[in-house]
Amino acid sequence: MTKTKVAVIGSGNIGTDLMIKVLRLSDTLEMAAMVGIDPDSDGLARAARLKVPVTHEGVDGLIRMDGFDDIGIVFDATSAKAHVENAKKLAPYGKRLVDLTPAALGPYVVPPVNLDEHLAGDATNLNMVTCGGQATIPIVHAVSRVTPVPYAEIVASIASRSAGPGTRANIDEFTETTAGAIERVGGARRGKAVIVLNPAEPPLIMRDTVYCLIGDADQDAVRASVRDMVTAVAEYVPGYRLKQEVQFTPVVAGDPVHTLLPDDVSELPTTKVSVFLEVEGAAHYLPAYAGNLDIMTSAALRVAERIADRTREVTK
């Protein structure tokens, strides 16, 4: 089987981990280029040792590389600001972009929720939301497919050591992009996202908490839906798991939950659903505590592999 050639822009932690996942795990993708701007970066050095073509001249260098025309999918693992410029430069060449930054130029994609609807679409730039979004939006969707969710809030706690300069520079974009995707992909009427950089030593693995306000609903059905979704995510992120059973807490009289709801919600929620998750990384390149980065690269790999499979089916 002919593999689909891919390039990774960004030779930092995320880009390097993604490159190694492609090399080790993928039967359908082939690394054709690793792109950076720092000639001394570990990612470029490691790529060169692995016989992957490299350039330290950014997207301009990628476009000039031999074999660029044969690349079908380009991953962008830089920053939200850089992705805007990268996408603009790549637009004339018809590449499919998988964006691991919170730039959100294209539609949000969370593999177990809405990937299928974008495979046959004409979107050339698919956005992977954020690490917190990839971890929690599947759970919001799992609740919302059982019962309406007028409000959902997520808290993503990641090890401070796993938050590089790109992550720290994109905190505002993280919260805005994740909140928007909680609504548009997760199905909540209103969403909120919080990120916590945990300075604990030794570093702790990623922990995520999902809160959903709902009305009267079949709690067993909600629990089953959440468990099924956790199983679906764990197919491509083996370290993704429930920390404890799904919790249901009655909303007591006087709780000001109305302040969290959209103006047009007439019936106040009666129950708060709490879901506690942890994400342990696969340690392909990053340490195991960096589950926040592992879930992003794992999700991006899943998206690209499905795009490649779909392209082959269409061209048969």
Image (cartoon, rainbow, N blue to C red):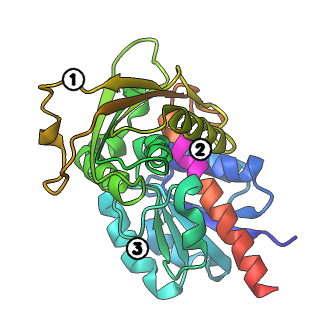
Q: CA distance from mark 3 to mark 1?
A: 49 Å
User: Reading the chain from its start, which is encountered first: label 3 or label 2?
Assistant: 2
Q: Kindly identify the residue that appears in the image at 73 percent across and 51 percent down.
A: 23
What amino acid type is highlighted by mark number 3? Ala
Image coords of residue 29 (percent x, y): 73, 63
Q: CA distance from mark 2 to mark 1?
A: 46 Å
Residue 29 shown in magenta? no
Q: Which residue is outermost to the right?
A: 1
Q: Give the residue type at disc 1.
A: Val
Against 244, residue 308 (above or below) is: below
Q: Quadrant of the N terminus?
A: bottom right
> Which image quadrant for residue 195?
top left
User: Element at badge 3?
Assistant: helix
User: Quadrant location of the C terminus?
Assistant: bottom right
- Report the residue marked by disc 3: 87
Q: Position of residue 179 (x, y in %)?
A: 29, 50
Tell me the magenta residue range.
295-299
Q: Please tell me the numbered disc located at residue 17.
A: 2
Disc 2 on helix, strand or loop?
Answer: helix
* Residue drawn 34% across the image and 23% down it: 249
Mark nearest the camera among 2 and 1 is 1
Q: Mark 1 sits on what residue?
A: 252
Give the SS element for disc 1. loop
Residue 184, disc = none
